[in-house]
């Protein structure tokens, strides 16, 4: 009898809760739309600037018999300023894409972007184009060789950097190679292939690695020696905070052992990025650490646009090449 009473009571409570409906009025509020800029500048050239807005949506227009997706914001005046002088502008070419027209840009110069649009608050941002320091391939100390194959058939080189002590610098390193070989049915024709290589480094200076599709802090880096799987790192990223103004050596392991017998050149590509670009990559790395966590704090993606969103950053690049000759066996 007591069991029956308890069951009836539970059913009563459940029905009581399910029948309670309360209407909650939510006051309307306006969220101000802001312009969003994404652009990276270099000495001698500028990548196209893309202008959009927060809370934007895809608008499809039927133009000249074709459906065109309007993703960006048009109708803006975009100026580039150096030392308080306007040296150029970004001219709209469609769909929120703007192309630069003006004076050439130079390393070690600070550039300000100013954007005016009738429907948004004016926005601005500054960045300085960094300079690439002296870089070269150094000899391995044990045998004086410029490259060597490790026990796992990875090719290792030593990169020397003479860092500029007058500024803080931030580096991205990638690698590629050239392969040449002949097919047996046509031995007189040499086929040349350009290949993007995976790379890694055990240097304590390395802070972040890029493994498509995410950036990770180096403590999450792939351990080549203890794993049977191939690494996928495409970039290694670090700052000069531990060696500013000094010459340093970084050992770099380049992967793709199946093809080394046909490799004739190794290229290291060193890109020096502005602090804004570096902080953006650090925020991507912080976001990557929370990807597999069910409950985590929100990560703010870095941006440096005043009164707006997005990134205005700079970079400079240089490549060095090394001829290699490996045994075909």
Image (tube, rainbow, N blue to C red):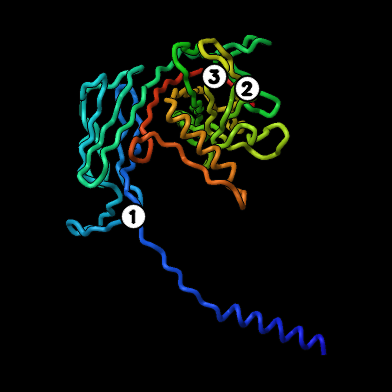
Mark 2 and mark 1 in contact? Answer it, CB < 8 Å.
no
- Badge 1 local density, few (<14 within 10 Å), some, or many (20+)? few
Does 235 sit above or below residue 54? above
Residue 96: image location, x then y, percent: 27, 44
Does 153 sit above or below residue 250? below
Disc with the residue nearer the chain's start (1 vs 3): 1
Q: Give the side of residue 153 with respect to residue 71, left or right.
A: right
Q: Which residue lies furthest to the bottom in this view?
A: 1
Residue 30: image location, x then y, percent: 33, 55
Does 128 sit above or below residue 76? above
Q: Nearer the viewer, mark 3 or mark 2?
A: 3
Query: Which of the pair 322/54 is nearer the observer?
Result: 54
Q: Which of marks 1 and 3 is in front?
A: 1
According to the picture, the residue beneath numbered tag 3 turns out to be 241
Query: Which of the pair 82/9 is nearer the observer?
Result: 9
Give residue 19's quadrant in the image. bottom right
Q: Which of marks 2 and 1 is in front?
A: 1
According to the picture, the residue beneath numbered tag 1 turns out to be 30
Say which mark, if any, is on residue 203. 2
Callout 3 secondary element: loop
Quarter of the image for the C terminus: give it: top right
Disc with the residue nearer the chain's start (2 vs 1): 1
Mark 1 and mark 3 in contact? Answer it, CB < 8 Å.
no
Callout 1 secondary element: loop
- Badge 3 local density, few (<14 within 10 Å), some, or many (20+)? few
Callout 2 secondary element: loop
Q: Distance between the residues labelled 1 and 3?
A: 43 Å
Give residue 18's quadrant in the image. bottom right
Residue 221: image location, x then y, percent: 63, 34
* Residue at 41%, 23% in the rendered image: 317
């Amino acid at each position: 009898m007591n069991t029956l009473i308890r069951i009836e009571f539970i059913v009563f409570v459940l029905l009581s809760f399910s029948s309670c409906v309360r209407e909650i009025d939510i006051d309307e509020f306006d969220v101000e739309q802001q312009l969003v800029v994404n652009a990276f500048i270099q000495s001698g050239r500028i990548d196209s600037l893309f202008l959009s807005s927060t809370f934007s949506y895809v608008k499809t227009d039927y133009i000249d018999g074709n459906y065109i997706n309007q993703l960006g914001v048009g109708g803006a005046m975009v100026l580039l300023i150096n030392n308080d002088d306007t040296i150029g502008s970004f001219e709209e070419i469609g769909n929120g894409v703007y192309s630069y027209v003006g004076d050439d840009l130079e390393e070690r110069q600070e550039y300000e972007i100013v954007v005016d649009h009738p429907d948004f608050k004016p926005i601005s941002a500054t960045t300085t184009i960094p300079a690439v320091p002296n870089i070269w391939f150094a000899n391995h100390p044990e045998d004086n060789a410029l490259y060597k194959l490790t026990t796992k058939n990875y090719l290792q080189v030593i990169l020397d950097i003479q860092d500029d002590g007058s500024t803080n610098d931030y580096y991205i390193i990638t690698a590629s190679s050239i392969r040449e070989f002949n097919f047996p049915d046509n031995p007189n024709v040499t086929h040349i292939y350009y290949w993007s290589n995976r790379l890694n480094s055990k240097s304590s200076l390395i802070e972040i690695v890029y493994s498509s599709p995410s950036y990770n802090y180096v403590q999450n880096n792939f351990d080549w020696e203890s794993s049977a799987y191939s690494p996928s790192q495409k970039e290694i990223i670090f700052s000069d905070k531990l060696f500013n103004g000094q010459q340093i050596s970084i050992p770099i392991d380049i992967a793709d052992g199946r093809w080394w017998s046909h490799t004739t050149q190794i290229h290291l590509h060193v890109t020096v990025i502005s602090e804004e670009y570096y902080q953006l990559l650090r925020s991507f790395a912080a976001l990557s650490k929370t990807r597999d966590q069910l409950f985590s704090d929100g990560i703010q993606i870095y941006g440096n646009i005043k009164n707006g969103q997005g990134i205005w950053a700079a970079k400079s690049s240089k490549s060095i090449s090394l001829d290699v000759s490996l045994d075909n066996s």
